[in-house]
Structure formats: C-alpha cells, structure tokens
Amino acid sequence: MLQRSLRTPALRGALAAFSPRATSTTLLPRISASLSQTRLLSQEVRSAIDKAVASAPVVLFMKGTPETPQCGFSRTSIQILGLQGVDPRKFTAFNVLEDEELRSGIKEYSDWPTIPQLYVDKEFVGGCDILINMHKDGSLADLLAEKKVIIEDDTNPDTDAAGQQAQATRETTEQSTGGRSKDAKGESS
C-alpha cells in the first residue's frame, strides 16, 4: 500500500525536497516562489511611513476615516480612542484604502498582519484586539495619560504647543506622501 501511494506525483514531489538528490534546479523554483511572497519595504515607503508615524502623538492607520470607518475593527478603535478622551489636536488617522503601498507597507513596517494599527508617541501599540484588552484593563488610559495626549480641562487650544507641532508635522507629511490625514473630528489637515 505504501509503495502504491509513493507513486502518486504529489507525494513524490513533496518527498523530493527531502531527498539527498535534490539539486538547485529542483529547489530554486520552490525557494523563489516562497521569496516572491515576501515583500521588501522600499526605503521610500519606509520613509513616508516614518513621517506618518511621527505626524502626531497618536496615529491610527485604519480603513476609512474617523467619521466613516470602512470596517468594524477601525470603528471600534476610533470609539475606544474617543472613550479614552484622546485630544483631537494630538491625533491623526491615515486611510490605508487610499494607498495600496501604505496598506501593505504598514503591515511590514510594524510586523503586524492586520489593520487598524495604533502608534502612540512613535511606538507601535497594536491592533484592535490589543486596544480592546488595554481599554478593559486600564493600561491604555495609563499610557495615554503618561504621554499627555488626553483632553485636560485646563488645556488651551491656542497655546498648546504639542497640538500646534502635530498640525505642522501633519501638513509636512501630507505634502511629502501625497496623502491626506484627518483628525478625530474628521477635518482634513
């Protein structure tokens, strides 16, 4: 029975890779196919994502915009940030649906397979599942308070240097990436 099953082409091909007689001509097509599935992030895309991540203290890469999320996970992430009281002047979101390079590049950049992705103070926090857990256990509130990105009653929007710096950085980033970012109110920068 085993002899008969080894005669089938699929099993012979699978076993050939383990054979000491395997040569570069038999292995290279398999290796090439595997490598072609791995996308290497270009320096240009990496630089654009670096600028986007640095464009505000809180940055969310999402599907859609804060006022019209295009998936439930993006909607949930926006709702959590709203519940946490993130200051809209210190927040920006990038719609990955507008740019395929950004959509695939951010996944490689963060080594995280899903969108949305949250960055706080240029550090990757996680996706929607991580945000939910951090929201539930209070660690997200602690992180946001530590980074001073939540709305405080005594904050004057006209004299808030971090908010003004975030706005200027967003404008510079948009010019260099060609993308539009939106703040939590949905206003284009």
Image (cartoon, helix red, strand yellow):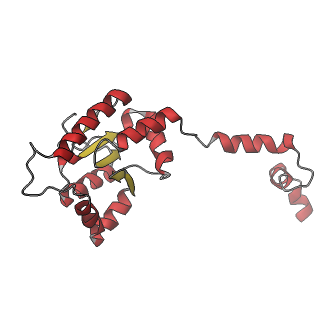
Give the residue displayed 41% in from the left and 41% down from the top. Answer: 50
- Residue 99 is left or right of residue 159, and the answer is right
Q: Is residue 156 above or below residue 164?
A: below
Q: In which quarter of the image is the C terminus?
A: top left
The tally of labels here is 0
Q: In which quarter of the image is the N terminus?
A: bottom right
Residue extending farthest to the bottom is 137
Q: Nearer the viewer, residue 46 or 183?
A: 46
Give the residue displayed 32% in from the left and 66% down from the top. Answer: 134
- Residue 101 is left or right of residue 71, and the answer is right
- Residue 127 coordinates in the image, percent (x, y): 38, 56
Res. 142 in view = yes
Q: Is residue 18 above or below residue 159?
A: below
- Residue 149 is left or right of residue 112, and the answer is left
- Residue 103 coordinates in the image, percent (x, y): 43, 40
- Residue 167 coordinates in the image, percent (x, y): 22, 38
Res. 1 in view = no
- Residue 17 is left or right of residue 94, and the answer is right
Give the residue displayed 35% in from the left and 52% down from the top. Answer: 118
Give the residue displayed 26% in from the left and 67% down from the top. Answer: 142
- Residue 174 coordinates in the image, percent (x, y): 31, 31
Q: In this view, does 139 lie above or below 31?
A: below
